[in-house]
Image (spheres, coloured by chain):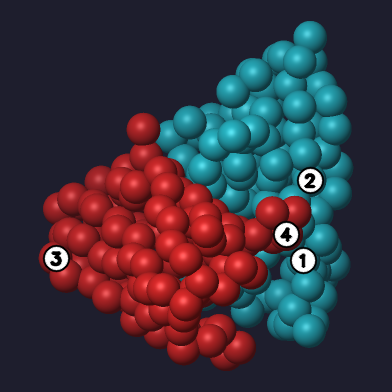
Chain colours: A red, B cyan
Amino acid sequence: QSVLTQPPSVSGAPGQRVTISCTGSSSNLGAASHVHWYQHLPGAAPKLLIFANTNRPSGVPDRFSGSRSGTSASLAISGLRAEDEADYYCQSYDVSLSGSVFGGGTKLTVL
Amino acid sequence: QVEVVESGGGVVQPGRSLRLSCAASGFTFRNYDMDWVRQAPGKGLDWVAVITYDGRNKYYAESVKGRFTISRDNSQNTLYLHLNSLTTEDTAVYHCVRGGGSGTDRFFDSWGQGTPVTVSS
């Protein structure tokens, strides 16, 4: 059971927009900790996609965007492409556990 | 470019020990906090431990506290994870990760491919 809750899977057709939710609690997202997002392609190392709720590292397309409100956060992917098919994880810091925590991951399928 | 390369994984019996290494290059290693994150087969990402840039402070996930030890050698640009009293629950790919941000807003901005650890009798 992960500290942050994500849907196990989402899907969309090429060109569509999908969102992935991440729900936390008062000891992580509700404690004003930032949320960060990672993309994990099959056979590759995980890659930072969004940091500090809404910021994209250099090289990440603006098709990827993040938002956060209270104890929840979302990752949106617009203009879906086949190469976006991957597992996506949210991550934050939990003040009760004194450590970083991840969501259980969401598998994105591009139909 | 930033690169972290893990080594030292393998198959080990329950109760035994293992030491993982992570060679860092392409950045000033001594300036960054470093973490280990693992992924068990078919499971999600699981944070294991962090060590501050100067090696003075170390923090662990509850599941490994007292059994794993994180350390670093800034003169060799190398991060370590000593795994003791291993159980089958520790079977996972272990990733070396460079930390970004600070305090409660830490994130992981560069990841290695990982080294697999299998605990089996």
Q: Nearer the viewer, mark 3 or mark 4?
A: 4
Is residue B11 depicted above or below A52 in this figure?
above
User: Looking at the image, is mark 3 or mark 4 earlier in the sequence?
Assistant: 4
The residue at which mark 3 appears reads as: A70
Q: Quadrant where the C terminus of chain B lies? A: top right
Q: Determine contact: label 2, label 3, CB under 8 Å.
A: no
Q: Determine contact: label 1, label 2, CB under 8 Å.
A: no
In the rendered image, is residue A60 in sight? yes
Q: Nearer the viewer, mark 4 or mark 2?
A: 4
Disc 2 crowd, CA 10 A, few/some/many (<14, 14-19, 20+): many
Mark pair 2, 3: CA separation: 36 Å
The residue at which mark 2 appears reads as: B115
Mark pair 3, 4: CA separation: 32 Å
The residue at which mark 1 appears reads as: B4
User: Residue B65, position in %: x, y?
Assistant: 50, 34
Is residue B102 depicted above or below B26 in this figure?
above
Disc 4 crowd, CA 10 A, few/some/many (<14, 14-19, 20+): few
Disc 4 element: loop
Q: Nearer the viewer, mark 3 or mark 1?
A: 3
The residue at which mark 4 appears reads as: A44
Disc 1 element: strand
User: Looking at the image, is mark 1 or mark 2 earlier in the sequence?
Assistant: 1
Same subunit: marks 1 and 2: yes
Q: Chain of mark 2?
A: B
Residue pictured at 61% horizontal, 42% vertical = B39
Residue sitting farthest toward the top: B121
Q: Chain of mark 1?
A: B
Residue pictured at 15% horizontal, 53% vertical = A26
The amino acid marked with disc number 1 is Val
The amino acid marked with disc number 3 is Gly
Say how many tags the image has. 4
